[in-house]
Image (cartoon, rainbow, N blue to C red):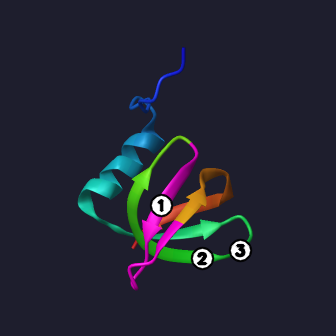
Amino acid sequence: MTTTEFDTSLPSIRQLQELLRQKTLVEWKLVNGDSLIGKLAWQDHNCVCIVDSTDRQITIFKQAIAYYQAK
């Protein structure tokens, strides 16, 4: 049986949920060196979706994220 809920005991899940709730602007640094700035729109087990300053939605696989930091 698989679960669709996040394991909220994991700090990374709690941190992303807090960024989502607070609509915090975040810089996302990707493993390929690209940098994106936007607010978290949603997350699932594999991806996050951010919305940039032009309201463009960008879906990023979590494996592609080197790090992120609140702006």
Mark 1: secondary structure: strand
Q: Which mark is residue 64?
A: none
At label 2, the amino acid type is Ser
Q: Which residue is mark 3?
A: 33
Q: CA distance from mark 1 to mark 3?
A: 18 Å
Mark 2: secondary structure: strand
Q: Which residue is mark 2?
A: 35
Q: Classify residue 18 as left or right of residue 60.
A: left
Q: Which residue is mark 1?
A: 49
Q: Residue furthest right?
A: 32
At label 3, the amino acid type is Gly
Q: CA distance from mark 2 to mark 1?
A: 14 Å
Q: Sequence order check: which comes first, mark 1 or mark 3? A: 3
At label 1, the amino acid type is Cys
Query: Residue 55: x, y in percent?
Result: 38, 79
Image quarter for residue 67?
bottom right
Q: Are the residues at dot 2 and dot 3 in contact (C-beta closer than 8 Å)?
A: yes
Q: Is residue 19 magenta?
A: no
Name the residue: 45% across, 50% down.
43
